[in-house]
Image: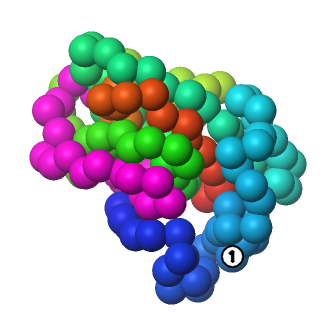
Amino acid sequence: MILDHLSRAEKYFNMHSSFKHAFDYLRTTDLRLLAEGRHDIEGDDIYLIIASDNTGNERRKLETHRKYIDIQLAIEGSFPLEWHDIDSCKNVAMEYNGSDDVSFYNDPPLFTVHLAADMFAVLFPEDAHAPQPPMTAVKKAIVKVAV
């Protein structure tokens, strides 16, 4: 997992051939104006999901993906993001579903970070993660970058 501020994203461009394009899109697009839902950047290779999340009390399960790297960004507001390394997740809640590119785990997180506006987390296939309900309503972006 990488945790940083959008203004420093160029430090990570060399980690994946599509990161520059994905981060350039995030930095040059007024994400606050985009409607909720999917927005293609490079078809299925890079796409953006705009989502709103409201307060709640129910803990969400850790999840992993095999086909995509997630770049999660708080646009307005902030939200907690739980993390655990996949190698030590032992309590599978749902085996990998290839059509949805997701597995779920009941393991507790090893730590929680709070993504504030313009902060991002890069979550690789080995990063079990769970965005949790925020304290106040939040608008966020999830960029899916094909592995």
For the N terminus, which image quadrant?
bottom left
Q: How many marks?
A: 1
Q: How was this image coloured?
A: rainbow
Q: Position of residue 83 (x, y in %)?
A: 26, 46
| For residue 27, side relative to residue 101 (left or right) | right
Q: Depth check: give the residue in front, 43 or 136.
A: 136
Magenta span of residues: 105-127
Residue 124: in magenta span: yes
**Residue 26 visible to the viewer:** yes
Determine whether 103 is above or below 70 in the image. above
Q: Compare residues 140 and 87 and report the one nearer the observer.
A: 140
- Residue drawn at (71%, 29%) of the image: 36
Please, is residue 61 above or below residue 72 in the view?
A: above
Residue 96 percent location from the top left of the image = 46, 28
Q: Is residue 136 left or right of residue 6?
A: left
Tell me where residue 117 appears, x and y as whole percent. Answer: 46, 54
Residue name at image x 30 percent, y 29 percent: 135
Name which residue lies at 32% across and 16% down: 56
**Magenta span contains residue 107:** yes
| Nearer to the camera, 95 or 132 | 132
Is residue 111 shown above or below 118?
above
Helix, strand or loop for disc 1: helix
Q: Residues within 10 Å of mark 1 (few under 14, many from 20)?
A: some
Q: Is residue 128 left or right of residue 18?
A: left
- Quarter holding the C terminus is bottom right
Q: Decide if residue 98 is in sight here.
A: no
Residue 114's x, y, as percent? 29, 49
Pointer 1: what residue? Answer: 20
The residue depicted at 67 percent of the width and 38 percent of the height is: 49
In the rendered structure, which amino acid carries the disc numbered 1? Lys
